[in-house]
Amino acid sequence: MILTIFRPKRTKDGKPHVSRSYRSRYRLEEEDKLTDIPLHTTDKRVARERLERIVREKQLEAVGVLSPHRAALQTSLERHLSDYLADLQAVGRDDQYVFDLKNRVCRLIRECHWALLKEVSSDSFLAWRARQTLSPKTLNEYLASARSLFNWMVKHGRIERNPLALVQKVQSNGKQLRPRRAFTREEFQRLLAVAGPRRALYLTAVFTGLRRGELAALEWDDLDLDAERPFLKARASTTKNHKEAVIGLHRDVVAELRLIRSGRHAPDQRVFEGLMPRMKRFRTDLKRANVAYMNSRGQRADFHSLRYTLATNLALAGTPPRAAMEIMRHSDMRLTTKTYTDAGLLAVWDKVANLPSFTTDCAIEDSQIDSQNSQIDSQKLVRTSPSVSIPVKENVQISGLQSADRQQPTLGMSTPVTTSQENVKWSGRQDSNLRPRGPKPRALPS
């Protein structure tokens, strides 16, 4: 076996030139010719380690023990994607999620020219992203789909690291192409006035936060309108997070659902069968209600905006964020408070106007008012307060003069009481003076 590393030499313009990068030549025992490969490094120690690793893999391949990483490198990326999609379906991921991920990764494979795994690099992805005119949110979804594939390959030992792990996301705050908004109370009332048979649907959406697909799959057997506290049950097979949810119903929703239940008694029949509006129908209802589909800030009001309206109304009602997150069935509180709550409808200006002032004139005026109020309160307290007893500790000496003095009642003072455990003399008073005005009771005449 022959193993050699060297730096190639050549002559240019009559002068010798030595390359900075190392190459190697090796020949295994079972081979007849030398193999010349570049090592892509300028460090001799690194070049030697790379050559030893290549020879070791060649030896394992020769005896039929192929390295998993090397096998993955020789397999097409489409085959890896097919295995990943099959695994997602086996663990029960949503069909729409699998469909979207497949389309995104297939587009990247096609437009980035990723036939084999060794051709995948962050530079090729960045070059592809720079050519796109898609929204920042969509570009981040492409990156997330590709990352999920490579993370799965790392987890199962097909590759050592994710080639797109260090690619930064595109900043999407303030750059949404189609931001949503919540309906105001007046707008939603006008929408209900023209909704006709879809009135119960819109009320259920705005009070429960159910999504369009969840509302469409709701059956009469999922509702209990006659219970002491009416509720509906969203089945795990119909919800986005695949978790069953029991949602309490508002009295307005209960009244409307009872009206449309009169002629429908089949338990497995859809509640809103034939009532789910398409986007064209919904925009027609908005136009009849004089509600702008797109406002001056570029925010749109579509069917999913009814869910935004619920989150905003919960914030206006002072609902704790943790409770609002449960009602919205979110896994992250930030999604409820930042994304789904329309800050434009919150009483932010009123809260600022109610803050105390820091200007000089207002501060003096406020202090004068507080002083007057405190004087009035203290006078009222003196007039209405009962007699207060204050403990006064003093040493008690038994003498004839002091005993005689104690037998004489003092004006405005109560009879002192002395306990055996503590020599404490209690004196009751109704004003702040401890004795009446005038000379002391035991003062000698002049």
Image (cartoon, rainbow, N blue to C red):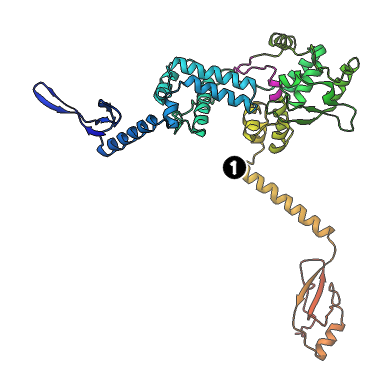
Residue ID at (84%, 72%): 412
**Which amino acid, mark 1?**
Phe
Looking at the image, residue 231 sits to the left or right of residue 303; the answer is right
Looking at the image, residue 409 sits to the left or right of residue 336; the answer is right
Q: Position of residue 39 (x, y in %)?
A: 29, 30
* Quadrant location, the N terminus: top left
Looking at the image, residue 361 sits to the left or right of residue 213; the answer is left
In depth, the one of 43 and 314 nearer the eye is 43
Residue ID at (50%, 21%): 79
**Residue at the disc numbered 1:** 358
In depth, the one of 329 and 199 nearer the eye is 329
Q: Where is residue 201 in the image (x, y as percent from the top left)?
A: 79, 18
In depth, the one of 125 and 320 nearer the eye is 125
Looking at this view, name the residue that lies furthest to the left: 14
Q: Residues within 10 Å of mark 1 (few under 14, many from 20)?
A: few
Over which residues does the magenta segment extend?
294-308
Residue ID at (90%, 18%): 265
Q: Say which quarter of the image contains residue 23.
A: top left
Is residue 138 something one can see in this rendering?
A: yes
